[in-house]
Amino acid sequence: MNDRIETLILRIDPYKESDGLIQVITKEQGKLTVLAKGIMKGNSKNAHAVQPITHCSMIVDLKESISLLHTASIIEYFRPIKEDIVKLAVASMIAEIAAQVSSADQPDEFLFEITKDSLSALCRYPALLIGSLYISQILREMGISPMVDGCVVCDDSKVIGISIAEGGFTCQRCSKNTASKYYEAGFNRMFRHIVKAQLNHAGTLASQGDISLQLLSVFVDFFKEYTSIPLKSWEFLRNL
Ligand SMILES: [Zn+2]
């Protein structure tokens, strides 16, 4: 059977002598593993299209465990990402998150679209902003957004810190009794904006100042705490 599918390639692992196992997400089938024969050989006709962090159209033989690739063609290569090490590191984190929160045989149009649109936005906007926005939207979709309307413990409107364990902002008093970290008002304001924002606010947010690695790390900490998913790609990104 030949099935045409629209995919985002998340990663490729070498398999046997010259084959590759491609991990993709699709709108209709959720996460899929696709076997690409001979892809590691220089003369493979699909090699140019089959690369991680690529939006790709594929004709495959859909199978329950491992589908078989016939042909692949690029829809969007995301060139600016491949040419910038920080963008590439953030894209790898996005791909790892997408792989971790998706499942096989479970169509997930939201995840496909938000991942595709975030990679497009990553080409144009600062990497740490798009990384933060991506995690924020995944957390919201999972129903585990940080609480940013006042203190998460007592509702006091004057907040000074963030507690990962409590799940949001903390006020002066409550921050003493919880594992909270203090941040400047500007940091907290930007954190709140990103928790509330949609991806299409990226342009406005980008004009409000740089996003620090520290701000992205708060989103990463929330993600790790509430999903129990370790993020290997984050270790690489934060050491850049
Ligand atoms: Zn409080």
Image (spheres, rainbow, N blue to C red):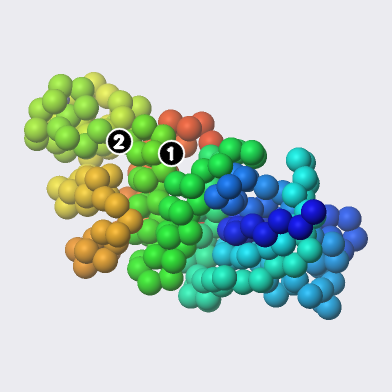
Residue tagged 1: 223
* Residue sitting at x 17%, y 35%: 149
Q: Is residue 60 above or below residue 62?
A: below
SS at mark 1?
helix
Find ligand 1 in the image and state its quadrant: top left
Whole-percent x, y for residue 26 in the image: 59, 51
The residue type indicated by label 1 comes to: Phe
Q: Is residue 21 visible?
A: no
Whole-percent x, y for residue 209 in the image: 22, 64
In the rendered view, does 206 fall on the left or right side of 189? right
Whole-percent x, y for residue 52 in the image: 63, 63
Residue 16, by quadrant, is bottom right
Residue tagged 2: 146
In the rendered view, does 74 fall on the left or right side of 199? right
Q: Is residue 209 above or below residue 106?
A: below
* Residue sitting at x 21%, y 37%: 148
- Looking at the image, tell me whether mark 1 or mark 2 is earlier in sequence order: 2
Q: Is residue 142 above or below residue 4?
A: above
Q: Is residue 55 visible?
A: yes
